Amino acid sequence: MTMLYLTGIILSSFLLLLLLLKKDKSRADYILSTWMAIMTLHQLTNYLEFSKIAYQYPHLLGIGFALPLLHGIMLHFYVADLTGTQKWTLRYILPHFIPFVLLILLAIPFYSLSAEGKKEVFLQQGAGYEWYSVTQLLTILASGLGCVILSLRKIQTGQKILNQNPKHQKHLQWVKHLSIGLAIIWILVIFFNDQVIFGGVTVLVCAIGILGINQVPVFVGNFMPDPSTPAPTSSLPRYAKSGLSASQSDALFEQLTQLMKTQGVYKNPELSLGELAELLSVHPNSLSQVINEKTEKNFYQYINQLRVEAFLQVAALPHKQHYSLLALAFECGFNSKSTFNKYFKKLTGETPSTFFLSLKQA
């Protein structure tokens, strides 16, 4: 059992380290980092109790009373940020921590005990504090299962919003499995002892690491590449002579414009020059040259400008007001917050938040 505890602690510490070393971290990465730190601390406190090390330093006993509540909260925050279905305000964030603070306040009588008093309570299996154990269990289960249910609902909403983005769909599927795994942990809490529960936690940490690295690069690199960095589409020189006459060039650009208006292919976050050229039945070099000549932009600049223009239209719709700006940006084809901000500012001269704030104040 000792090895199982240590395995969980080492794995969660390793995943935390990977997240901290990750470049260009998003808010979701910081939330997941916090969660991994909490998971490491929670497993460590239980290992110290299981191994009796904490009995040598009794003031370590009980420091993990309220920690289980934070797992559901961190999952919910992580899902909310990934799906872009929630606006981040203190009014939204703070109420989640009420049960956590409540459990700490209720534990003050225990924390006020002497070192020997704390040790005696644990040796007597919580004698005199049975009321706290029941309150703790009910609060943890209600909060934990509630956060899992809310997370699954947000994932379902996010899958509908981001149904054209396969990378986000894959990432949300991973988080869905993570949510179900956490729900299983709460079920274990009802029926089994700490050894079985933390055995399940170790398995969950292993799953987080394996699926997070293999399915989507959660812990290394960004799972949302910046599409402003073009990928090579052909072994031919990028601006090889296309051989198009002026009339052919005009006709191709008109065909391209109509395709964008009628089918909105720019909303495909994976769209490449080669794929677009295939839709228009032309060589990628010809299409690239026409875009450059007619718009004075390269392929990625042209596509991202269309996405920003579509975003401005969508964001003005009354029935879209409850969605976050990032969720609407994903809907319009962006798959990176940094790329969205970059092109939005390039087109409007302001960041998205500043732009919409000025509109509200006008």
Image (tube, helix red, strand yellow):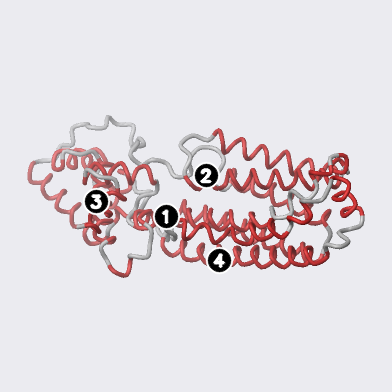
Mark 2 or mark 3, which is nearer to you?
2
Q: Which mark is residue 1?
A: none
Give the amino acid type for the residue marked by disc 1 in the picture.
Answer: Asn
Mark 1 or mark 2: whose residue is earlier in sequence: 2
Q: Secondary structure at mark 3?
A: helix
Residue on which disc 4 sits: 150
Residue 220 position (above or below residue 178): above
Graded by Cα atoms within 10 Å as few (under 14), some (14 to 19) or many (20 or more), the crowding at tag 4 reads some
Residue 331 percent across, percent down from the top left:
36, 58
* Mark 1 → mark 3, Cα distance in angstroms: 17 Å
- Judging depth in this view, the residue of 251 and 210 nearest the camera is 210
Closer to the chain start, of discs 1 and 3, is 1
Give the farthest residue toward the bottom.
Answer: 319
Q: CA distance from mark 1 to mark 4?
A: 22 Å
Of tags 1 and 2, the one toward the viewer is: 2
Q: Quadrant of the C terminus?
A: bottom left
Camera-side residue of 103 and 145:
103
Q: Earlier in the sequence, mark 2 or mark 4?
A: 2
Give the quarter of the image for residue 108: bottom right
Which residue in the structure is indicated by mark 2? 29
Along the viewing direction, whichever of 341 and 140 lies nearer the viewer: 140
The residue beneath circle 1 is 165
Q: Quadrant of residue 285?
A: top left
